[in-house]
Amino acid sequence: MSASIEMPVVKDLFGKDGLAKGHDANHPIYLDYSATTPVDPRVAAKMIPFITEDFGNPASRSHPYGWTAEKAVENAREEVAKLVNADPREIVWTSGATESNNLAIKGAANFYSGKGKHILTITTEHKAVIDVVRELERQGFEATYLDPEPNGLVDLAKFKAAIRPDTVLASVMLVNNEIGVIQDITAIGNICRENNVIFHVDAAQATGKMKIDLETLPVDLMSFSAHKTYGPKGVGALYVRRKPRIRIEAQMHGGGHERGMRSGTLATHQIVGMGEAFRIAREEMELENARIRRLRDKLLHGLQSIEEVYVNGDLDHRVPHNLNISFNYVEGESLIMAVKGIAVSSGSACTSASLEPSYVLRALGRSDELAHSSIRFSIGRFTTEDDVDYTIELMKSKIGKLRELSPLWEMFMDGVDLSKVQWAAH
Amino acid sequence: MAYSDKVLDHYENPRNVGSLDKNDPNVGTGMVGAPACGDVMKLMIKVNDSGIIEDAKFKTYGCGSAIASSSLVTEWLKGKTIDEAYAIKNSAIAEELALPPVKIHCSVLAEDAIKAAVADIKAKQLAKETV
């Protein structure tokens, strides 16, 4: 039965051989894997029986329906723990990384608020961290939002200097969602340990893209998401360290599930999906990431043949899946409009409804113009070499066309220094 | 965001892209907007001795609606007198292209570009007369 489920899913998304369907506006090539990933067909096949046949409540202790569901949930917990080398008892199921971040930051800040009321984080964090810290500020906490260096990485000396005697919690993401840079969470975590500060890491963009070993990492709390790693949307997990034990206050009450940290009936099928997705990631990431790195490098070299392009964020400390590039003298919205054959985002998917340039790129010190003209390409499991070739040619031709239209490009070619021009304000 | 068919048409096939000789005494140039705001329009018109606009060219850095607005006005300007050109209102541009409210500023910018180009040609004519 699983084979008959598997094939239509693959065909609908990618056509035969897993190639992205067509290159038209309705079926663009998907290069937005950092926004979300398709559920791997193997994951979908594993989930379906838990919706229909094995539908039991994992909390039901009195019959086999419950036992089967509970076993599946615990298997999945083990798979999630294995990917990050943690104890399964350190994994708490949530509805996704946003909830994990809320539970970790509010939960720890509230539990340890007697120790201090200062929180330290970074300006390039995802909104699911920034907005949580802002909420805690409203409740009487104080916060420091540290700017990273122009390459997107945290300066360790500045981080250390920002810690105060009353700092209770620090939150720094492992992999940035917009620019893909990897923070040195070992060094940052060690600074936190030395200063008795609880350390939370949002790793939503990191699983399956790099090795994570919580046995050795000095991290107390870590957030995970399933749908960035070929699992379903609506499920995630929070790692809560047992040794030394970290305590958090529950944010959701009712029933005492998940050892009291997160109440609510477990979504067995979603959890099974996350477990299977993380199992596949653990087993395949080494080969897969080598392939993705080749594709990303090919895309990078292809795009670098265009004049006046700037890579945003450090290229060495970066996951291979991400390429964020600014195309100078071309306006971002018209660029997105021009490249309808590919599905990409400018800035993060959460902000493309607004006309504001990306706050992450601005935190790196990029000018508004360069921030406005940025595109995030994120590639993944189903990206092919043909997709990359097509993208390079498309970008070359469309950038050329838009620059023919651009008075700024004309001035640049004439040697005009645009920073010295008096622009008519409007 | 959904664009109207007319915006898409001008965006895909922009009319009269390019530049005229800015030193020609019969050519007026209007450049409006700022890169930091996300749009810059450059409009050039060539006016014959009877005050009729013979040619119009544009270049625009901006969104699809900004490109369409400037492309449209180059079509409208040809054959008009400079006074008729000066009277073109942004509301007419916005209506023709069915611009959504968030894009009205693109039509305002196009009107500003026309006014700047007309002011430039008038200044040049005045300079010619005083010589």
Image (spheres, rainbow, N blue to C red):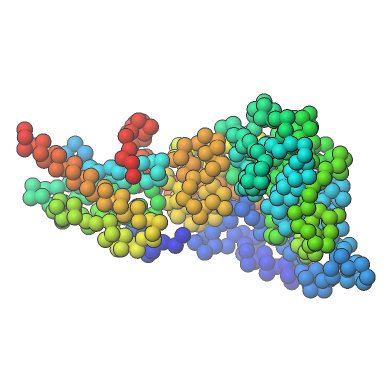
Direction right: furthest residue = A62
Could you say where residue A279 lies in the image, as x and y percent from the top left?
A: 80, 53
Q: Quadrant of residue B97?
A: bottom left
Q: In terms of depth relative to the viewer, which is nearer, A382 or A91?
A: A91
Q: In the displayed structure, does residue B64 sit left or right of residue B124?
A: right
Instruction: Give the quadrant of the C terminus of chain A.
Output: top left
Residue B65: % across, % down: 37, 55
Q: Look at the picture and state if A356 lies above or below A232.
A: above
Residue A76 visible (yes or no): yes
Give residue A275's quadrant in the image.
bottom right
Q: Quadrant of the N terminus of chain A?
A: bottom right
The residue depicted at 66 percent of the width and 35 percent of the height is A317
Disc count in the image?
A: 0
Q: Visible in this render: residue A210?
A: no
Q: Residue at x 8, y 47 (%)?
A: B49
Q: Residue at x 23, y 44 (%)?
A: B116
Across and down, in percent, residue A269 comes to 78, 65
Q: Position of residue B81 (x, y in %)?
A: 13, 53
Q: Name the residue: 54% across, 59% down.
A: A28
Position of residue A157 relative to residue A225, above or below, is above
Res A311 → quadrant: top right
